[in-house]
Amino acid sequence: MDGSTVLAMTMTEATGPTPVLELAALTKKYGSVDAVSNVDLKLHEGEFLTLLGASGSGKSTILMMIAGFIQPTFGDIRLRGKSIVKTPPHKRRIGVVFQNYALFPHLTVYENVAFALRNARMAREHIDQRVQELLMKVRLEQLAHRLPSQLSGGQQQRVAIARALAIDPDILLFDEPLGALDKNLREHMVLELQRLHHQLGTTMVYVTHDQIEALVMSDRIAVMDAGRIVALGSPQELYDNPKTVFVAEFLGNSNILVSEDGRCEALRPERIQLGSISEGCQRSQGTVTEVAFLGDRVRYEVRLTNNQTIVVAVPRRQGIEVYEIGAQVTVGWHRADARPVTRDNA
Ligand code: ADP
Ligand code: MG
């Protein structure tokens, strides 16, 4: 046992298990643009973490720094406790799946996956077995001899995943991998990715601007704004208890109720009742100003007597009354559902 092992073990005992990946004050500047500012993050073994943010918020830059394709301006990236900022990408044991998949068009499914293994200098006699194994994992063993152009978008996606898994990575990174797919396929692939994560147990960092993908798949979500992580928590924590107006509005929809002294509360549209209000709710009168039929629910805008307009989402159950524009209605909600939030994102 050498000195550094002893040190690592002591630190592990003092602070709990070493995170798989740790970002410390990670920063990337392009001239005067702060693409990523001072990001701290620790990933646990087997975790599925999503970086969720609007376009330009710095998500891809973080991912590319983890993968090693972009050098940080400042800060550190540690893989199982060891700094990797000076390690070249191909030695990091990190797999990446891009939105455009970057498959070789002239190579079959089999050869696309085998290519990654040859690149990683796997012994020839092991490659065949490994490729079969990987293709089984992503359920493509029947399509091994097709070209990418003979596959659906979802199937191409799975080839890209098999290829990224080939090196048996410590971490798998995804950069908006479902962005190019249509809605139904995207929903299907979200479930596929979830299945794969459960099956493999690999630590995954997933980048998206799509809040539904983030809510469905993630163990934790890091919400990003202008190069910073502005919130970090489980989907349910962030949805039920957002701390800021920004998060309340970015993750799902929220009404922001502003009191006379300027304090804000976030209230989810589906937490508001319309018409018959349960016991113990706080009530208010209003006028319906918009009605939108959304299939599974009706979305109302209601102008309250204090002139604030709120959005109410009413699930379409049997016996629920539907109101028209101009209707005088009572709205109500449980006090505890209006969560205090600040305007400050710091
Ligand atoms: P996201 O992936 O969240 O859409 P990016 O990480 O790609 O965001 O970009 C974050 C910010 O950094 C954006 O303002 C973008 O314009 C800027 N940026 C990214 N790459 C470069 C670059 N090579 N040169 C200058 N600015 C860049
Ligand atoms: Mg991006």
Image (cartoon, helix red, strand yellow):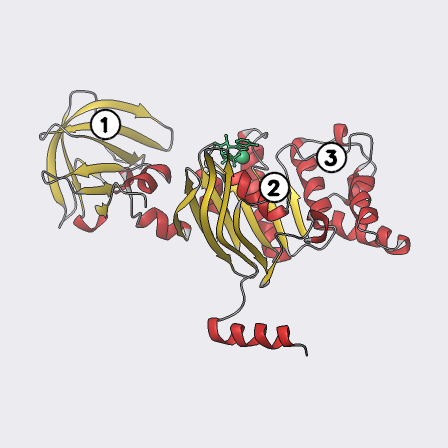
Q: Is residue 293 rendered to the left or right of residue 84? A: left
Instruction: Find the distance from the CA under tag 3 to the CA under tag 1.
Output: 47 Å
* Lower sequence index among marks 3 and 1: 3
Residue 103 is tagged as: 3
Asked whether the residues under the numbered discs 3 and 1 touch, taking CB atoms below 8 Å apart as contact, a structural biologist would say: no
Residue drawn 41% across the image and 53% down it: 234
Could you say where residue 110 lies in the image, as x and y percent from the top left?
81, 42
Looking at the picture, which amino acid does disc 3 mark? Answer: Leu
Judge by depth and name the residue closer to the eye, 186 or 328.
186
Q: Secondary structure at mark 2?
A: loop
State the image quarter where residue 328 is shown: top left
Judge by depth and name the residue closer to the eye, 299 or 258.
258
Q: Is residue 150 rendered to the left or right of residue 313? A: right
Could you say where residue 152 lies in the image, as x and y percent from the top left?
69, 31
Q: Which one is in front in this view, the residue at disc 2 or the one at disc 3?
A: 2
Residue 23 sits above or below residue 109 on the image: below
- Residue behind mark 2: 70
- Residue behind mark 1: 301
Q: Is residue 23 rendered to the left or right of residue 199? A: left
